[in-house]
Image (cartoon, rainbow, N blue to C red):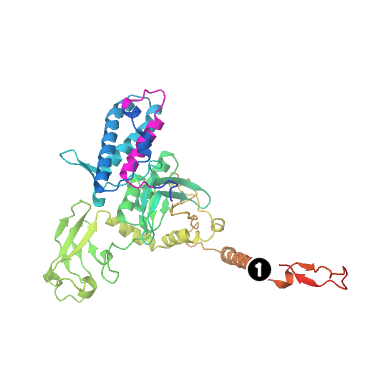
Amino acid sequence: MASPAAPTVSVIHLLGHLLVRLVAAWPASIPMPAVLVVLDLPLLRHPPRWRTADERQQRLQIVVATAQQVLATVTPVVATRSDSERAPLHVLVQAIRKVIADETATDTTGRITERPSDDKGTYRCQSAVDLQASFRKHEGSVATFGVNAVISTTARRIRACVALTGSTPDSETPTAVVRQLQAAQVPLPPYLIMDQAAGRGPTRAQIDVLSDGQTQMVALIPASGGSDPRRFNLADFQFNRTQTSCTCPNGVVSTRVYAHGSNDGVFFRFLARQCRDCPFWAQCRDPDANPKGHRTVFISTSHAYLRAADAFNHSELGQQLLKARWLSRTDDRLAGALPRLPASPPGRAGGRTISTLSGLRGAQSTHVAEPPETASALLSDKQRFGLIVWPLLWQATQCAHRLWMVLPHPDSRPLMVARPSGDGFSSAGVPHPSR
């Protein structure tokens, strides 16, 4: 969701705007420190345009040094005030501190420089007006400055609504929804349905742990990053329960296990001699792979969740849940057509509904309906007619009406009678179409 605020053009403008807002937010009940009184607010609002790299460097040095001096003076003053007085000031102080840390670096001589793009911090603040907004990028679309708005709904009501900073990955949104439901002390849903952004193992494990097993993530399992769909993937390899051995599709077993650097899984290595003369070489190896190279297979600590999710997604109930999410996007009347779930055990979803999760991208919102009451419950012919045929008829009527308004209709134009001739009389009025 795009923010109404625009990102600033440089860190110099951003720090200047934050300092101006800090002065404006300073309450009258607290004596204003001298370092804020002497600030040149017009210069901070509209810094002069620099024409050379040296001028820009000098301006950056001045504004960062000023901001650091303000932080050193204001921080102890704000810490001693009440919560009501400290809250608006603390937000701005933290924003100034984050901008300096994310955007700038200071060498041993005290020279301040702007960090390279690859070295800047994460979830960077880009606007003094909207501190929560950051850039959100989807493949195939331009970056949007705003928030990642997430809605968890049933067929008839909104269960949770969270606005996260725009740079927040979609895979982290389900945990934010569960935390909001827990903070509101409402029952958690038995299933949380989302697209494949929430289908990876770590996200499923986080939801299971955070909900204490009350909520299960329902989503398609995405393909491994960069993997070739024509080659073997992780599902084609078999592992024992203790994850000490791996069996390839050809039946070769590897017991060479190596821990991953981040401690979130292990690697199994198949040596070149184990793969020699394998009939599945073309399906397992890249065409340009070194014949003497090893074949490694990575299994994460959340692999068990992926195995369970794959089995659930292929079950009849899983297919119904996944299908219901996309069917409901065609027409909100699907909510009334789908039957209600039967009462579930206490502590699950209040015995009534299943929550679904969707992101707001731009101005688009999605609504997900409740699944059928049983795995075999399907829409009746009358319900299908109401959901499919009536919307199509309504759209056809609208199109016909718009065409009638646009296309010319000479026979239906208003007519007017010509004026009489010069003698003031006319034997008959001659109709002429109006101009």
Q: Is 412 rendered above or below residue 31?
A: below
Query: Considering depth in this image, is 281 or 122 the residue closer to the camera?
Result: 122
**Which range is magenta?**
7-34
Element under disc 1: helix
Query: x%, y% of residue 373?
Result: 50, 56
Residue 118, horizontal then vertical, whole percent: 24, 52
Q: Residues within 10 Å of mark 1 (few under 14, many from 20)?
A: few
Q: Quadrant of the C terminus?
A: bottom right
Q: Is residue 156 left or right of residue 83?
A: right
Q: Is 63 on the left or on the right of 242, as rendered?
A: right
Residue at 66% x, 68% y is 404
Q: Residue at x 15, y 76 (%)?
A: 277
Q: Nearer the viewer, residue 98 or 254?
A: 98
> What residue does disc 1 label?
404
Magenta run includes residue 17: yes
Q: Residue 212: give x, y in percent of width and height.
A: 35, 45
Q: Is residue 280 visible?
A: no
